[in-house]
Image (spheres, rainbow, N blue to C red):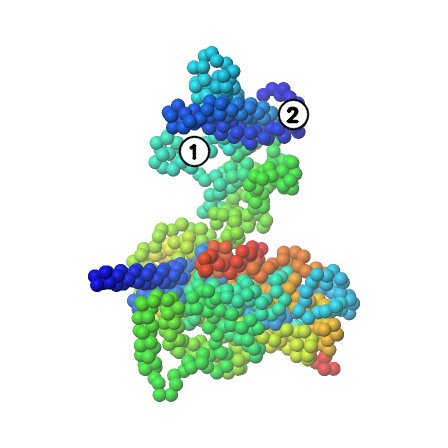
Amino acid sequence: MSTLLQASDWTYFIGRFHPVLVHLPIGFLLVAALLEIGKRIGKISVSDSSISFILFWSAIGATMACIAGYLLSLGGGYDEELLSDHQWQGIGVAVFAWIAWLFKSGKISIGTAIYLPALGLSTILTFTAGHDGGSLTHGDGYLTQYTPEPFRSLAGIPPRTEEKTEIKPITDINQAVVYNDIVQPILEMRCVQCHNANKQKGGLRMDNMVMLLKGGEDGPIFVSGKALESAMIKRCLLPENDDNHMPPKGKPQLSEAQITLLSWWIEQGASADKKVSDLKISEQVKPALASLTSGSGGENAKSADSPVLSLQVPVPNEKALEAIKKAGLLVLPISHDKNLLEVSAVNASAFGDQQINLFSPLSEQIIWLKLGGTKVTDTSVKELSKLKNLNKLHLEYTAVTDAGLSLLKDLQYLEYINLVGTKVTDAGLKNIASSKSLKNIYIWKSAVTENGVAEVQKLHPDLHIVNGFNEAKVAEFLKAGDTLKQAEISKTK
Amino acid sequence: MEKLLKELQHANLHSQTRRHFLQSAGFGLGALGLGSLLGSCGNSNTETSATAEAMGAKIPQFAPKAKRVIYIHMAGAPSQLELFDYKPELEKYHGKDCPAEFLEGKKFAFIQGVPKMLGPQGKFNQYGQSGAWMSDYIPYLQTVADEITFIKAMHTDQFNHAPAQLLLHTGSARLGRPSLGAWSVYGLGSENQNLPGFIVLASGGRQPDAGKSVYGSGFLPSVYQGVQCRTGGDPVLYVTDPNGMNRNMRKQTIEAINEINKQTYDDVKDPEILTRISQYEMAFRMQMSVPEVMDVSKEPQFILDMYGVKPGEGTFAMNCLLARKLIENDVRFVQLFDWGWDGHGTTAGDNIEGGLRNKCRLSDKPVAALIQDLKMRGLLEETLIIWGAEFGRTPMQENRNGVVMPYMGRDHHLEAFTMWMAGGGVKKGYTHGETDELGYYGVKDRVHVHDLQATILHLMGFDHEKFTYPFQGRNFRLTDTEGKVVKNIIA
């Protein structure tokens, strides 16, 4: 686009008034057209001079909008074709508005038949120009993006693929492709509105990897491996009121976690197809990555939640739930937004092996299970091993032994197991400790020995094996108070 | 005559409609009260399933990290400057006049004129892998430093005990709001059908200054208020059968009363009648369960030693042990109050050298024991322990009425104080926030009591902004219009 005027602050200052001014002729012209129709079908009485007056101001408004619009376009970054359409339609509105006024006001009295077509054309052009203007600002398809069915199919609009206002929750973060599943969705949310096929602010498109690599009019926007030297990151980190800050002041901003993720991707080589598990995950990135799995970066973002919580399971069978309740157990979804279940036998200490089949229809849903102090034995544990998503299991003070325990080590989400007061021995501990998911295991008052704990701990240093106090350990604990006694003695001295 | 009859008929119809309207409105209100309560514990065949539902376990908004809470409130407010918030710089200013910037435009409960600064009286050191600062006042807590998240820059709006306690527990310094415990059982119900979901145990010889309102149910149905148990003697008065009355007879009496109450409820639909019915039922079940759970005589000696408890005494240590037993029985919210931490320095009992040391001696061991005990039973992971008071103490020595006190003491301080949490989804061995070098203001990561409440609710699975109850034409929440979840302390 040729630059006729030297772009100055004044150019942009006036140009930015285009969206304000543009609504004047739209409104005025519509009023003029409606009055003309109303008058002609005899519904209202309105003088020609009134309509002429309105038309005059329509033409003035349209002309001013055209001038401001031209100045705005000098800033560049718009789809040329669309811009050209918009421009000529806008000029058309102004020209036909002037023509309509000239006839209506009686300045020209020959060929009055042209008046109606001129007014009509001018009005129609406000619609088309307005629509193109909207597309320039908000992107193509903005207007109809949320068209509901069945109108969507009727109008031949393809089904809506993806929400662009939120990052889609990721079920298995490790398998997520960093660019496709994390980076591009962030760009879609925050950048693409101004950097797309139709509108290329700074000559930059961010709607796909190829264009992203190409960069803008100042060249590439990131240096692979060096996040802090990348313009893309630098601009995000500038203070919001800095002229070079992106996204521009007033637009939705990137969250801290989102900047962290983008930086991390660039830092790790800005690959197009590597998965999260292929890259090095620093402590700093962990919470940001974790926020993706919960589906929102908001206040409810959970920092280090168990992967089991992101499982999508079917709605539990109503009859199976009723049967469990009838046996005196508590059974509830772990939260309102999930089908995962928590089951507790706190009010049913008589619960035993013969009832364990009650859980079978809910083998996917039950993740937290409290059977402490019940009559279950290894027979039950065999059934429990079929609850494949089991995450926390209370078996304290039950007759469970090493044999039963060994059946649980392949449960891939099991993180917590309470074996306090059971007959489990060192061998049983060693066996279950080989579970890949297990994090905390409680063996106080079981048959596990101190040596057994030490040995298993050596093999699995990350596993928390929690033993408890006995007489000797309590005596040791009580020694902490000796400093108090000493303090007292020194005081009395 | 005919006209008169018509008039009568009309009036009759009129009153009927009005009555019907009132009735259905009453039911509507009841339904509102119970409307959001979902799930039940299977008592659906009893006549009062509505009450069972009201108290039965319920579903949180999102997966909780803390299933249960023990809130230890040190009523009166211990000095953070003697226990956790180590300020070597304050030592240098000991005995010097307080800088004017600390006093201008500030109001204190007792300090007048220009007080002197008071240096830290405890001997501080760092403990655990995390290097948490603690003083020699609390040697036992030092041993569990790595289980704890300290919040060093707490602040509140109130500098008098009762309003500050109300603000902390109910979100408002004025009476009438439900307490944190009441909100918890309103939202999550109670898992153990034989025990109340919200139990209160008090020690130290006095109730908290704000009275029962700090564990009240406010505008929530009164079924959610805290049930206070005595710690010495019968845990609940009249829980044992009186002479000449056997269990069966009592059961029949309660059933008869509930039958009448049920009829009244059918007539007037006042949800408070349901509360009454459920309290009778609960009381009967508690006759069995409470003596059992509150009986510490079956605890092994080394456990009693660990807490420093002798069966039969009603001490803070006993309350800690009982708290563990209640949590072990899946009680949702256990509130401990311990009175006597108000160290102004006016008498030999309320000063730093004697009073605070003595309170620490009575409470330090049982609190550390409680953390250890819950941990080894595998209960700490899901139980959130909160320790703290309604405010903190000033870095200045109190000078009540402008005169120097006979003992060392500090005035109430709302700008900065320390609280700590352990278990239930908070970080282990972590310190959040910082105060200035004299411990007067929070300078980094300040946490208001509303933020604390928002965080506790968050850990229990509730978005504090969406966890509301409609009352007097608007939705109320614990944090009212404030509160931000302190995400940094969440594990």
User: B424 or A386, which lies in front?
Assistant: B424
Identify residue type, mark 2.
Answer: Ala
Give me the chain letter of mark 1: A
**What residue is rendered at 32% in x and 61% in y?**
B18
Indicate the quadrant where residue B195 lies: bottom left
Q: Return the residue nearer the eye: B460 or B382.
A: B460
Q: Residues within 10 Å of mark 1 (few under 14, many from 20)?
A: few
In the picture as drawn, the residue positioned furthest to the left comes out as B2
B436 vs B28, left or right, is: right
Of B435 and A361, nearer the camera is B435
Q: Note whether residue B433 is visible.
A: yes
* Residue named by callout 2: A7
Q: Residue at x 46, y 52 (%)?
A: A307
As shown in the figure, which amino acid type bears the numbered disc 1? Thr
Which of the 4 quarters of the picture holds residue B128? Answer: bottom right
Do discs 2 and 1 belong to a common subunit?
Answer: yes
Residue A298 location in percent, x, y? 52, 49
Q: Chain of mark 2?
A: A
Point out residue A317 in the picture as x, y percentages from the top left corner. Answer: 32, 55
Q: Which residue is mark 1?
A: A144
Determine if residue B373 is in view. Answer: no
List the single residue furthest toward the front: B1
Instruction: Identify the element where label 1 is drawn.
Output: loop
